[in-house]
């Protein structure tokens, strides 16, 4: 049983267990202990989003790492994929992201990348927990010149901006394109506007005034309606909405219609198949992706592989079987030929490049797939519920699945980042599946 780590690192309300400075310092010590497997000095990158609690977590992590004789490279606010990039670019031994991604500002989290820029596998996270709770590190105290030191990397944003611009085709520009960009008052506020403007776009920016408390608040990828309204108001060509740590992207077309991660994946997969760049003609996504995406992939001559929810599991499947592209309906898109994790900025550039090359509006490109009606019911719980030991609930699910037949499906799972049970139902009739989702939600709430 995990004590600290969930599906995407450690996460919780800042200053309440497990997101305390005491735990953060011990996590720093454990990471440092694990990377000290060879002679010489070792370095760990630490970056964060714009939450006010990031300062205390950053200092606690740095103190823990330095106390084990490992140096720290501080990059400040930078998108999660940017921290993965800096980690590999600077040949660091590990990278740490202080962020709770799309969660509200009072939450925070710790995600860890290994030296190759990939998120730590489950077994290494288990090793970190074992080191913390077994007290194995208690007596390890480097002294004198063996203590680590911390320094800031002032040009980290610039390095990441150049990396992103180099991915955009050299013969293309964004001249003449008007883009509405919502950075969710998060880590991309100092990166995304500059990338798009330097490539020639006219940018109307939203969510670029972080104050430590407004991250993700009624804006960004979780609330694309703000972006969509601004697109309709200004007559922009497209809207781009990023989340707090910049690893996911949701867009809207020129009419203000929201286009989710499934449609973006379908557009990008079709382009990659045409160019012979989609390895094994396979798209990797999660159990949450719409059935319509699977149908679209078959029509393109490709196939789709599903994993558990979480971009880390998508990446693990891609690495295991040699696939090059995958993602989640929520907007995590992973282009493994370019970077090791989901990157909202990179995904936006790939989509914009396809629009430029094919000289089509997003509304036209989005017709590549037709979504089945899908309803998601998130039920917040006060304690963990084992639905396997809830016979009446299981019987209700089985009965509903029989009614849906092959034209629908039901997925019930516990969130790995929040005290929430998620009920997702797909089918041909939205009214029917909404009633089913509400019924199951009420049963969970009652339990």
Image: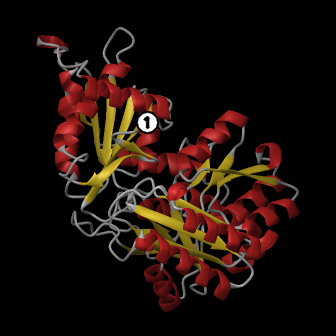
Asked if residue 67 lies left or right of residue 412, the reply is: left
Q: Which residue is mark 1?
A: 113
Circle count: 1
In the image shown, does 292 or 361 lie closer to the viewer?
A: 292
In the rendered image, residue 274, in percent from the top left (x then y), is placed at 83, 56
Whether 236 is drawn above or below 32: the answer is: below
Corner quadrant of residue 66: top left
Q: Secondary structure at mark 1?
A: strand
Q: Residue at x 54, y 79 (%)?
A: 439
In the rendered image, residue 38, in percent from the top left (x then y), is placed at 39, 10
Say few, some or many: other residues with alpha carbon within 10 Å of mark 1 (under 14 / 14 to 19 / 20 or more).
many
Corner quadrant of residue 83: top left
In the rendered image, residue 397, in percent from the top left (x then y), is placed at 63, 68
In the rendered image, residue 354, in percent from the top left (x then y), is placed at 70, 64
- Extreme residue toward the bottom, this view: 233
Corner quadrant of residue 312: top right
Q: The N terminus lies in which quarter of the figure? A: top left
Q: Residue at x 78, y 60 (%)?
A: 270
Whether 239 is drawn above or below 123: the answer is: below
Q: The C terminus lies in which quarter of the figure? A: bottom left
Q: Residue at x 24, y 28 (%)?
A: 65
């Amino acid at each position: 049983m995990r004590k600290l780590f969930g599906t995407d690192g450690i996460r919780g309300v800042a200053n309440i267990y497990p997101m305390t400075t005491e735990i953060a310092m011990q996590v720093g010590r454990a990471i440092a202990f694990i990377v000290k497997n060879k002679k010489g000095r070792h370095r760990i990158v630490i970056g964060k989003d714009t939450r006010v609690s990031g300062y205390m977590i950053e200092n606690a992590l740095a103190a823990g790492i330095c106390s084990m004789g490992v140096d720290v490279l501080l990059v400040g606010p930078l998108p999660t994929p940017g921290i993965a990039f800096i980690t590999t670019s600077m040949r660091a031994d590990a990278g740490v992201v202080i962020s709770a991604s799309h969660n509200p500002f009072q939450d925070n989290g710790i995600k860890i990348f290994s030296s190759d820029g990939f998120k730590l596998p489950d077994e290494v996270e288990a090793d970190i927990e074992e080191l913390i709770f077994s007290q194995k590190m208690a007596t390890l105290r480097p002294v004198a010149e063996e203590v680590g030191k911390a320094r800031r990397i002032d040009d980290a944003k610039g390095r990441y901006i150049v990396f992103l611009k180099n991915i955009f085709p050299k013969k293309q520009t964004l001249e003449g394109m008007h883009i509405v960009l919502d950075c969710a008052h998060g880590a991309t506020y100092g990166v995304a506007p500059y990338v798009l403007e330097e490539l020639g776009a006219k940018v109307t920016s939203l969510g670029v005034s972080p104050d430590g408390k407004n991250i993700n608040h009624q804006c960004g990828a979780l609330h694309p309606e703000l972006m969509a309204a601004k697109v309709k108001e200004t007559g922009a060509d497209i809207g781009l909405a990023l989340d707090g740590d910049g690893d996911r992207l949701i867009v809207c077309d020129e009419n203000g219609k929201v286009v989710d991660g499934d449609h973006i994946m379908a557009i990008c997969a079709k382009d990659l198949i045409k160019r012979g760049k989609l390895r094994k003609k396979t798209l990797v996504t999660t159990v949450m992706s719409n059935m319509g995406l699977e149908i679209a992939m078959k029509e393109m001559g490709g196939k789709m592989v599903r994993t558990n929810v979480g971009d880390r599991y998508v990446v693990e499947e891609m690495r295991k079987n040699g696939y090059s592209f995958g993602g989640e309906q929520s907007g995590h898109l992973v282009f493994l030929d370019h970077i090791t994790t989901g990157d909202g900025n990179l995904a936006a550039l790939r989509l914009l490049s396809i629009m430029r090359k094919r000289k089509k509006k997003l509304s036209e490109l989005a017709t590549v797939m037709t979504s089945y009606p899908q309803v998601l019911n998130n039920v917040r719980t006060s304690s963990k519920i084992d639905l396997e030991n809830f016979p009446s609930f299981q019987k209700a699910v089985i009965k509903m699945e029989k009614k849906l037949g092959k034209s629908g499906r039901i997925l019930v799972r516990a969130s790995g980042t929040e005290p929430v049970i998620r009920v997702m139902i797909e089918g041909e009739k939205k009214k029917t599946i909404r009633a089913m989702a509400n019924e199951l939600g009420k049963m969970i709430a009652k339990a």
